Amino acid sequence: MSTGRLAEPAASFSARRPGRVVWSKTCIPRRISSRFSPVTGATSYRVESAIRLNGAFVRVATVTAGSFTDPAGRVGSWYRVRAVDAHARVSDASTAVEAAPR
């Protein structure tokens, strides 16, 4: 398992900046498991993925807890997360982390 630190999402729904998101990933062929720490004020998280770091990110899931498994995930894909509050306001994206074998 490798661990990456993601930048703090912008506080688009709070006067205070949400806490740091920590993303750890376990790479198993065709399945990417990840965990990230909760953000104050968030009720859910949008997990996004892209084939390349500067490619188009698409939402692959919306989760309410700080873990996610992408059964279609591929090593080399990039993942990032956005916090969502109870009013459906969405934070800026965290820094993307590559799903890389350890």
Image (cartoon, grey):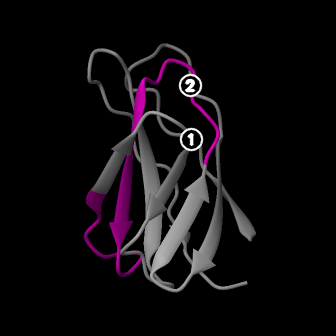
Instruction: Give the residue drawn at x 37%, y 21%.
Output: 85
Instruction: Give the residue drawn at x 30%, y 58%.
Output: 60
Instruction: Give the residue drawn at x 45%, y 49%.
Output: 81
Tell me the quarter of the image containing the C terminus: bottom right
Q: Is residue 29 above or below residue 40?
A: below
Q: Residues within 10 Å of mark 1 (few under 14, many from 20)?
A: some
Mark nearer the viewer, 1 or 2:
1
The circle on residue 47 is none
Instruction: Give the residue drawn at x 33%, y 51%.
Output: 61
Tell me the quarter of the image containing the N terminus: bottom right
What kind of element bears circle 2? loop
Q: Is residue 88 above or below residue 83?
A: above
Q: Position of residue 3 (x, y in %)?
A: 73, 64
What kind of element bears circle 1? loop
Q: Over which residues does the magenta segment extend? A: 36-59
Residue type at mark 1 is Gly
**Would residue 53 be counted in the magenta stretch?**
yes
Q: Position of residue 86 (x, y in %)?
A: 34, 16
Disc with the residue nearer the chain's start (1 vs 2): 2
The answer to whether marks 1 and 2 mark residues whose Cβ atoms lie closer than 8 Å is: no
Q: Position of residue 43 (x, y in %)?
A: 42, 23
What residue did someone put label 2 on? 17
Q: Residues within 10 Å of mark 2 (few under 14, many from 20)?
A: some
Gap between marks 1 and 2, in whole Å?
Answer: 18 Å
- Splitting the image into 4 quarters, where does residue 72 fall? bottom left
- Splitting the image into 4 quarters, where does residue 98 fall? bottom right
Residue type at mark 2 is Arg
Q: Main secondary structure of the magenta part?
A: loop
What residue did someone put label 1 on? 66
